[in-house]
Image (cartoon, rainbow, N blue to C red):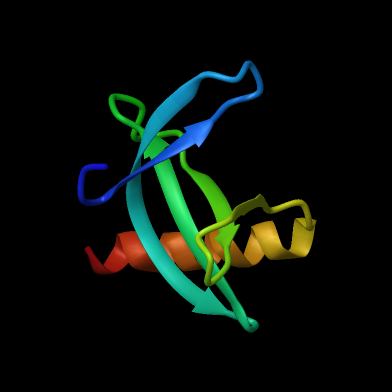
Amino acid sequence: MKENSIFITDENGKEVEMKIYMTFDANDKQYVVVYEEGKEDELYPLIYDDEGNLYPVEDEEEMQMIDEVVSAYEEEN
């Protein structure tokens, strides 16, 4: 695995390399925001645990919080 990349299996069982845009902790959870190379405008937030398992973000309030964190990050960089 390349540094700053993770591999995710999509709904069709295909392994896709995703680039890590940012990581952060909030509300006792760890988040990683990823994108597919060449599609930087499509960010995908995921929750990860200490074992490296990834989970989709399904809560609307949680998605809104992530959007705010990403926006603040983009303003700083």
Q: Is residue 19 above or below residue 15?
A: below
Q: Going by the picture, which residue comes out furthest to the bottom?
A: 28
Residue nearest the observer in this picture, 62 or 14: 14
Q: Determine the residue positioned at 36% across, 27% down.
A: 39
Looking at the image, is 2 positioned above or below residue 64?
above
Label tally:
0
> Left or right: 28 with respect to 60?
left
What is the x, y in percent for residue 45?
Answer: 54, 51
Instruction: Residue 53 in the image: state x and y as whole percent.
Output: 57, 56
Where's the C terminus, which quadrant? bottom left
Q: Residue at x 57, y 67 (%)?
A: 49
Q: Position of residue 26 (x, y in %)?
A: 57, 79
Where residue 67 sits, quadrant-wise, is bottom right
Q: Is residue 76 above or below residue 6?
A: below
Q: Position of residue 76 (x, y in %)?
A: 26, 69
Outermost residue on the front side: it is 51
Compared to residue 43, the image places residue 68 above or below, namely: below
- Figure quadrant of the N terminus: top left
**Residue at horizontal 46 percent and vertical 25 percent from the top:** 15
Using the image as rendered, state which of residue 58 and residue 13 is in the foreground: 13
